Image (spheres, helix red, strand yellow):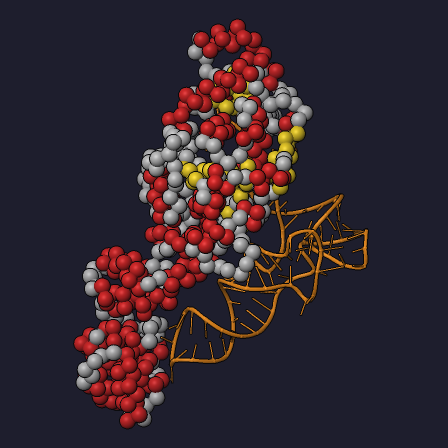
Amino acid sequence: MKDTSNSMASAANIRVRFAPSPTGVLHIGGIRTALYNYLLAKQQGGTFILRIEDTDQGRYVPGAEAYIAEALQWCGLIPDEGPGFGGEYGPYRQSERKDIYRRYALEMIEKGTAYYAFDTPEALEAQRQADPNFKYGSTVRLSLSNSLTLGKAETDRRIAAGDPWVIRLKVNENETIHIHDLIRGEVNFQTNELDDKVLLKSDGMPTYHLANIVDDHLMKITHVIRGEEWLPSTAHHVLLYRALNWEETMPRFAHLPLIMKPVGSGKLSKRDGAKLGIPVFPLSWQSDKPEDTVVGFREYGFLPEAVVNFLALLGWSPGTEQEIFSMEALSSAFSIEKISKSGARFDFDKAKWFNQQYIMATPNATLARLVRPIVEAHGHKPDAAFLEAFCGLMKERVTVLPEFWENGYYFFEEVRNHDLSGIAKKWKKENRPVFDGLIRSFSAIGYFDAETLKTATDTFMAQNELKPGDVLPALRIALAGTMKGPAVFDMMALLGKTASVTRLNQAFDHFDQTI
RNA sequence: GCUCCUGUGGGCAAACUGGCUAAGCCGCCACUCUUUCAAGGUGGAGAUUGCGGGUUCGAAACCCGUCGGGAGUACCA
């Protein structure tokens, strides 16, 4: 409403929250929301809060909260406050704040900005059946079963009798709600279009709407950065701030564009990952139900820095040509104003590119630590120096971690199968003695490094009037089985003399027999 | 249906308050390096800025209309 108020925000007091509900796994869109909140907080020296919105007891999924915490941790988005993270505004789990919400709901009843309603879910469902446009609002509430129509005595009697009830927000007629969204600008709603949202459910739990307003106020949240799916209910939220007399300190809103499916139309959903065989979640999740078991970016072989970088640029642009951002660089470059308005399609190719960039830039020793579990899972226990050198040779030839093994397994065990298509035409049995000579000269090398191997090979080729094309492909196939891979002499140096010579002899025998 | 949001090459996007041949990145295609693959380098294809009007000397930017996409519409968040 007031454009100018934005610049008056006191930088030091910024408090933002990420408020997921533990109803299952949290996909990458949720992580991005957390990221943007985190970036704003870090940039301004503010506070990043994790709040668990577990007010729907029916949808609670055990383990989901731990999943959220671990996912945030993996991405480097550590909350300053939250369940298990400390903070002075707790508890940070809404199920533990039940009484607080109830108190405010009752306060609203007192003030006349809310009322009791006794309509059963079945009765309301019947209304909707009869009229698809049915809306529990100002035009029909006087013909329904609530404290407005029943009167105080009957209302009290019903409550005392134990009839189930809910508390609903009483939306006034003929008002316009102005919202100033930090990303979208002015957004207006007519109250006549709004329904009387349930605030307190019959099980005593608050709905999202009430809980979110009460908590944001009590936790002194200054900026609400959330998905665009919340924009339509924001008018209700403003009404709640008003009803509770908190409008003066109402947080600013920023509604993020949605992340859309990689293919097809609609927003990204759980099923999209499995459908395309790509991760759309930060971490893997096991479930009894196969359809709920998902693969995460972590397990797929992504580095968290790459995922964060990718996500940051999906819906936000720094306005410069820079693409690679560390978390620190992101938080200094970030600004809500530069978040785009329209949905961004999830682009897995770009995610892979970022990962490749980060893998190439990661020191070999660090990569070795990440790759070791993968190699060990295949039954090998290489020493650190070997594994580091291996990572050095392979790192610009992989996009995700498991490819270190998939593309370079032959550094740890025998070549599974030799792709002879590249050398079939050139390999001649009568040349075998010549190649045996090359093996002998390799055997004679004392310091078995790439440089020496190259020199020896060059000399050998000159003596035998051979060209690189006659020799190198044969060596490569013999050693690796494939035409893809690091430079031949680098491979041999890493493999070592014994292994290289043995492998060449065996492979050449194999060539003789097969070709 | 109703309400709200949104629309720049295949994807992500830049172009601040209207002003030079509409950046850049991913992807794609060449070439180049390496007689491998990848990385790197160079170049290329691909956009009458959803469409139609209008305002203006000049519009992707402003106005009107129109079409498309998305979200919300629960005692779910």
Q: Nearer the viewer, residue A324 or B3?
A: A324
Quadrant including the C terminus of chain A: bottom left
Count the numbered circles shown: 0
**At 45% across and 56% down in the image, what residue appears?**
A325
**At 50% across and 60% down in the image, what residue appears?**
A322
* In the rendered image, the vertical position of residue A456 relative to residue A400, given as above or below: below
Left or right: A410 in relation to A259: left
* In the rendered image, the vertical position of residue B68 relative to residue B47, given as above or below: above
Quadrant including the N terminus of chain A: top right
Residue A138 sits in quarter: top right
- Percent position (x, y) of residue A382? 21, 64
* In the rendered image, the vertical position of residue A416 relative to residue A48, given as above or below: below
- Percent position (x, y) of residue A256? 53, 43
* In the rendered image, the vertical position of residue A501 relative to residue A304, given as above or below: below
**At 25% across and 69% down in the image, what residue appears?**
A411
- Percent position (x, y) of residue A69? 36, 41
**At 46% across and 50% down in the image, what residue appears?**
A331
- Percent position (x, y) of residue B31? 50, 79
Answer whether residue A220 is visible to the viewer in this image: yes
Q: Nearer the viewer, residue A54 or A449?
A: A449
Q: Nearer the viewer, residue A240 or A124?
A: A240
Answer whether residue A32 is visible to the viewer in this image: no
Left or right: A337 in relation to A445: right
Residue A145 sits in quarter: top right
Q: Nearer the viewer, residue A442 or A279?
A: A442
